Image: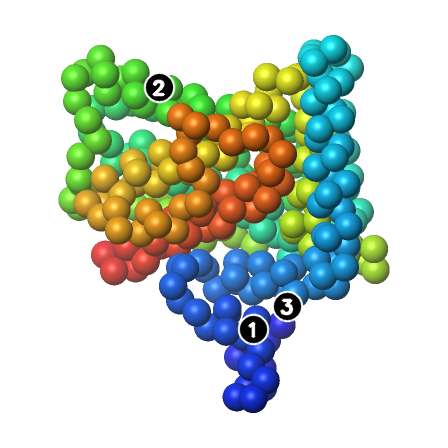
Amino acid sequence: MTDFDSTAYDRTDPDPWLALYLDTSNPIADRAKRALLATQQSRSRQFLLPVVRPLARAAIVLIQLLKIAIPNRCTSSRLLHRLLAWGLRTWVSPEANELILRHFHLGSQILGFLAANIRGVDLPLTPLEPRRIDDLRDDFFLRHDINLYNFVIELNRQLRAAGSAIEPREPLDLTAIHEPEPFEELPSRWHNLLDLQTAIEIFTPLYQLFLKDGEFWRASTSLQLDESVAVYTGTILGDRSWLALVNNRHPLVPLSTLRAGYRLVLHGLATETLHALLMAKKASAA
């Protein structure tokens, strides 16, 4: 990854990536920011993404037409996750793979934080903490969405039954929040060149093809639950001022699946932002 700390600075020709690295308006862990910028400034994103994105979106339209006729035929989550793991291991850059593995850990930690800080609820959790790419073959992408929906449903059913609501909490229980341990060595061969956005655009039509129609729509709409999770967290912290950083809105008005690939990247960024805010709270408390 680029060593931005030693990047030359020319006032007549400023480096846009250096500006984004130094900008602190969107909190994010330093290593995650370096990995994200490494994929953003890659040749893959510059030259492949403009070609891949319209083709991927056209594929989504064609597969949706196919699903009208045969919505739940020829589907296999097992085969899908084997293909995704193979694709990540074979074609995707180590920086993008690190961000993907990291996302499962951060999502599980955030749900753990919410469960520990909302009074009067007892929420079952099934954390997803992959250490290597092949761990994802165990339906991790599908289980990630299911975990989130189950959390929202169980939380709000219990709150309704008790006639209570989420309230500010002090002191906070931040036990669940920490930086993930380093992953097993990620593949870094000459063909591991795809950036994060291009890889996601390619994988999204595969996701749609191999899942049942309802499962794909459920996965797409789950991206807009970013706002719900952020509101829960902001209520506990007593501060919702940073909700403007959440871009996947609003779950009651779901967006088309056509832009699911781009919104998945925003989902990852929202998770990193929320986790960084909680890490800062933990550091302050310590």
Q: Earlier in the sequence, mark 2 or mark 3?
A: 3
Q: Which residue is mark 3?
A: 1
The foreground one among 100 and 47 is 47
Q: Which residue is mark 2?
A: 154
Tell me where residue 117 sits by quadrant.
top left
**Type of amino acid at the residue the image marks with label 3:** Met
Q: What's the CA distance linking mark 2 and mark 3?
A: 41 Å
Q: What's the CA distance linking mark 1 and mark 2?
A: 44 Å
Q: Residue at x 29, y 36 (%)?
A: 232
Q: How is the image coloured?
A: rainbow
> Which quadrant of the rendered structure holds the N terminus?
bottom right
Q: Which residue is mark 1?
A: 16
Please provide percent x and percent y for residue 236.
Answer: 23, 40
Query: Is 86 above or below relative to 13?
Result: above
Tell me where residue 131 sits by quadrant.
top right
The foreground one among 194 and 263 is 263
As drawn, is 111 to the left or to the right of 234?
A: right
Q: Residue at x 51, y 24 (%)?
A: 146
- Helix, strand or loop for disc 2: helix
- Helix, strand or loop for disc 3: loop
Q: Is residue 77 visible?
A: no
**Type of amino acid at the residue the image marks with label 2:** Glu
> Which quadrant of the rendered structure holds the C terminus?
bottom left
Q: What's the CA distance linking mark 1 and mark 3?
A: 16 Å
**Type of amino acid at the residue the image marks with label 1:** Pro
Please provide percent x and percent y for residue 142.
Answer: 59, 27
Q: Earlier in the sequence, mark 1 or mark 3?
A: 3
State which mark lies toward you, 1 or 3.
Answer: 1
Query: Is 14 above or below relative to 122?
Result: below
Q: Residue at x 44, y 45 (%)?
A: 247
Q: Residues within 10 Å of mark 2 (few under 14, many from 20)?
A: some
